[in-house]
Amino acid sequence: MEPTPYWFQLVVGFVYMAVAVVCMPVYGRIVYLFATQKLYKNVPCYRIIIHTGVLQMMMGSGSFFYGLMQVFNYDFLRLALYTITIMSVGIKMEALLSLVLAVNRASVTLKLHLFSSLFYKASIYIIWIFGTIDFIIFCTPLAAKTAVPGQFQSHHDRSKPYSYLVKDIGSYICMISYICTFVLYTIIVFNIIKLRLKSAHFTSSKTERSVLLYAIIQFAFKVILELVSSFHVVPTTPMGEFAMFMGYALMHLLVSPVLFLMLNRKLRRDFLRRSSTIQVSCQRTLYIHP
């Protein structure tokens, strides 16, 4: 790959940083609202969404520090390397959290209720433990990511003996998770279609629909990005690397907040309030199946 002009490196760095600076406060407020309102935080599906939001903001820090590295042409305290590693680990964790959310949506939509709230809590904790172990492995001499000024996307370090083994294992984890998630959402959609055909009076709550729609759209974005990355649709050029990195950064920091604000009217009202104090009206209640 040809050397990148420094002016282009500067532009890329500032764009990466701008995405994080603009999007993270917005996403942070949304996650805060979810985490502080009983309406959301005690419900398994929103609990999964809260943890996904926290994870995505942690991954978003990679965008800021990777951009900072491009601007100064130096990775200060290896912050870009560590945060971009979090971004890499987070992609696998996201895939697993998406699968757990799909299990929850299938359980509720199909009225199976096979799993208790404890199952979802345990699944979330296990995923965080897995992510922590994965991150630690990348911080050892066994495997590593790269963070090089002038390269606009991180790669697995070929000089480490197990970098590509860890990469392959992560790819299989993501692939299996995506396939299972796709199967579950397909079953859910066909079940909804069947119920609508059987009864013209079939309805579901707005909250149920918004959560399901959010989950499916978010899942679709992830799969498209993974397919583009896996099959090398985008050329390995500075512009191609920039496009791929921006795709992941925007998916983590922009797509979810936009979907939440579009699909959840109450959240939109709370988000737009000047005061962060949550006012609960006894006359307006919202119910969602656990």
Image: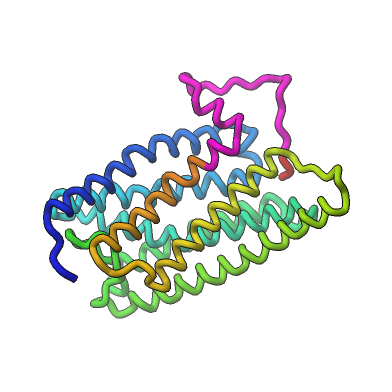
Give the vertical position of 264 relative to 103 (above or below).
Answer: above
Residue 103: quadrant of the picture: bottom right
The answer to which quarter of the image holds residue 36 is top right
Q: Which residue lies at the image location 39% right of the left edge and 78% below the top edge?
A: 165
Which residue is at the front of the view, 247 or 139?
Answer: 247
- The residue shown at (56%, 23%) is 278
Front residue of 266/48: it is 266
Q: Position of residue 288 (x, y in %)?
A: 71, 40
Q: How is the image coloured?
A: rainbow
Front-most of residues 88 and 263: 263
Residue 89: % across, % down: 41, 61
Q: From where the camera sits, is residue 193 visible? A: yes
Q: Magenta span covers which residues?
A: 259-287
- Residue 276 counted in the magenta span: yes
Q: Is residue 214 left or right of residue 84?
A: right
Residue 76 visible at all: no
Q: Position of residue 256 (x, y in %)?
A: 49, 45
> Is 276 placed above or below 44 here?
above
**Residue at 24% in and 50% down:** 67
Q: Position of residue 176 (x, y in %)?
A: 56, 71
**In the rendered image of this protein, does residue 175 appear above or below residue 151?**
below
Q: Is residue 263 magenta?
A: yes
Name the quarter where the N terminus is drawn.
bottom left
Picture residue at 47% right of the left edge, 63% below the top:
92
Q: How many numbered markers are drawn?
A: 0
Quadrant of the frame with the C terminus: top right
Q: Is residue 74 left or right of residue 99?
A: left
Q: Is residue 28 left or right of residue 259?
A: left
